[in-house]
Image (tube, rainbow, N blue to C red):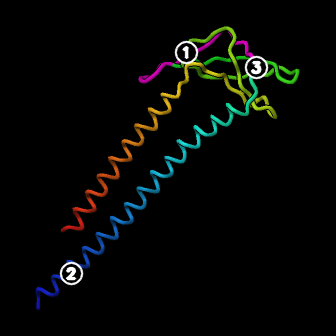
Amino acid sequence: MLDDYIRVGEDDKKRENFRFWVIYFVLALAVIGFISYIVYSRHIRKAAFDEQGVKAIATLDDQYKVIKSRRETKTEVTYTFYANGKQYAGKSYLNSPPQRTMEVIYAANNPELNRLVDSSFSVSALWLEISVFGIFLILFLFMEFRVLSTFLKS
């Protein structure tokens, strides 16, 4: 009779642990989905701006600032360009050394939304970012399923 009470207590404990892991797993998937959406939408917006934007030639200022971090070195530059008969200015960060003139892309309806076209940007950087994220996603899901299946077996 005492064994029956112990078994019932163990079953309740298993149910509570199972609920915890299900909620944890759902929340983890929601966080991964949100991060995926942010990364994907950033690249989609950039591609849409590149496709729909108008290109012009910008003149870079002589003064620029080199910003070094542990992972990369970027150059902060300011530039001016003409659009619709008016002069506009902008600031951008480059991965490559600045040239005197560079191509700028701007929104046709609002030239104040602009950026330099950095020729050093490559699609391989995008694929590297997506690949690393995918590997971490697969490892995370593998660990979650492994923990969940181990728990269910006990």
Seen at 43% across and 56% down, the residue is 29
Contact between marks 1 and 3 (CB within 8 A): the answer is no
Bounds of the magenta span? 56-73
Q: Is residue 132 left or right of residue 118?
A: left
Q: Which residue corresponds to the image point at 28% horizontal and 69% vertical from the top-left?
A: 17
Helix, strand or loop for disc 2: helix
Q: Residue furthest right?
A: 85
Q: Secondary structure at mark 1?
A: loop
Q: Nearer the viewer, residue 10 or 104?
A: 104
Give how far apart the Cα atoms at labels 2 and 3 are: 73 Å
Give how far apart the Cα atoms at labels 1 and 3 are. 19 Å
- Mark 1 is on which residue type? Ser
Please provide percent x and percent y for residue 44. Answer: 61, 40
Q: Which residue is mark 3?
A: 56
Q: Quadrant of the N terminus?
A: bottom left
- Residue 103 image position (x, y, % from top left): 69, 18
Q: Give the number of the disc on residue 9.
A: 2
- Percent position of residue 86, x then y: 86, 21
Residue 99 versus residue 107 in the image, above or below: above
Is 72 part of what is drawn in magenta? yes
| Membership of 86 in magenta stretch | no
Judging by the rendered image, the residue that carries numbered circle 1 is: 96
For image coordinates 18% across by 68% down, the residue present is 154
Q: Position of residue 4 (x, y in %)?
A: 15, 87
**Precedes in sequence: disc 2 or disc 3:** 2
Most distant residue in the bottom direction: 1
Vertical arrangement, residue 31 with respect to residue 57, above or below: below
